Amino acid sequence: MLSAPPASANVSRTRGMLFELIDMVMERGMHVWATAIAAKDVIIPSFQGHRGKRSFLVFLMTLLIGIIIRWLCDRLLLLRSSEGRRRNAQAMLNATDAHATPPTNPAKVPAIEGDRSPSPWVEVGGSSTPQKQVASKTLFWNGEATPQQSSHNLNTDTYFTDPPSPQAYPMMASLGGSTHNISDGGYGETSGARSSRSSQPSTPALQRALSPSSEEEEMLAASVSYNPEYRDLMMLLQKPDPQDCAKAFLGFSVVDDVDHHELVVDGIYRDGPAYQVGVRIADALTHIGGHRVNSVTRARQYVALHCRPAELAALTFLRPSGDSYTVKLWVMTAEQRFQGKPYYFDVSAHVKDQSPTASFSRRKSMGRH
């Protein structure tokens, strides 16, 4: 289950009570209209005259008033929250000016070989048979490296796990995959990503507080694709400290299709962040943050740059039918140390769906490039 925050936000509770009241008013209007319709042929034979028109207008007015009140309440709560954030930001600025304390930079990720800096992406391992030309099993991993199970079975429990060891995959060189560190500074983080991290403002919380309206509106717009539980957690706008280096969790895994130069979704967590926005097995990942991805190396680079826990990431997919769609994915983390945070995803409480190897032979037969 998704771990709820220790205490519910007052804004979310108040908004829920108002929505419940408005829904009750709207439901009452629907009940009155349904009762009038049912009694039309029994009690009032001439219902289609003046009375019918009046009842219809009452129903429309009730529905319209409920919609307007709900919208106004939502905007009022959003403005109140934004005003509070602006006051907090001003207080922080005043305190900073009074003490003249220079900001401190976030902890930089070491750029040395063998660095175990956290990776939001994948480590290549495993493969299907050479005849099917599916080069490498790509896994979203969390934690330290441990030996994996056999790589040829895509239904094993190696899904969403740790990076594999080179000894476990002797066929990787011939199939185009690699189990080595494919970035120059550690697992899953490129030098460009580290430069981006080090150049970020030293007080991101202050930056968000100075312009809360755009962030809240963007999150509110993206939350419509999620269920109510996700929406409440997203609108808390809580983020991990940059110095914690939280590992991103997207909720799906892919394989590298060598023939078509694309990354195909072969597994997904039910009710995970990707599943919520409509990502399904056999879809192909084509863009991350607006950048084209057709290999594991390129995808890792852009995920390291664009995917941060508790933030939105733009991902574009291509369905087997040829339809392309873009989603705003709310990135989470599956690390135990963040249990109890709104952005924590408990993998032990969710079911993992994984595609058999046959699904990729079907995709290959379509001849898409």
Image (tube, helix red, strand yellow):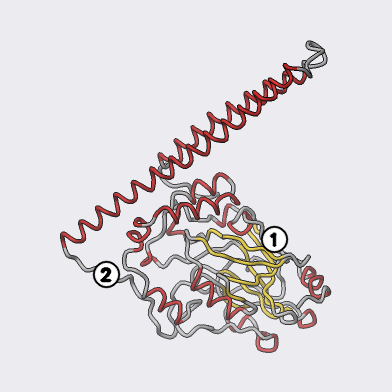
* Camera-side residue of 289 and 168: 289
Q: Residue 260: x and y, percent?
A: 74, 79
In the image, 224 versus 301, the foreground residue is 224
Q: Secondary structure under badge 2? A: loop
- Tell me which label, 1 or 2, sits earlier in the chain: 2
Compare residues 351 and 11 and report the one nearer the observer. Answer: 11
Q: Going by the picture, which residue comes out furthest to the bottom?
A: 174
Please state which amino acid type lies under the numbered disc 2.
Thr
Q: Which numbered tag is attached to residue 360? A: none
Determine the residue positioned at 71% across, 78% down: 257
Residue 171, quarter of the rendered image: bottom right
To which residue does mark 1 refer?
280
Q: Quadrant of residue 174?
A: bottom right
Taking the spot 40% from the left edge, 85% from the top edge, the residue there is 112
Where residue 107 sits in the image (x, y, percent)?
33, 72
**Quadrant of the rendering where the C terminus is positioned:** bottom right
Q: Is residue 79 above or below residue 326?
A: above
Q: Name the residue under label 2.
A: 104
Q: Give the side of residue 198 with respect to residue 221, left or right.
A: left
Q: In this view, does 318 lie to the left or right of 11?
A: right
- Does 33 sit above or below residue 272? above
At a point 53% along the width and 55% down the height, the residue shown is 346
- The percent position of residue 146, horizontal first and vertical second, equals 54, 73
Q: Nearer the viewer, residue 182 or 369?
A: 369
Q: Where is residue 23 in the image (x, y as percent from the top left)?
A: 58, 31
Distance in Å between CA atoms under marks 1 and 2: 42 Å
Q: Label 1's element?
A: loop
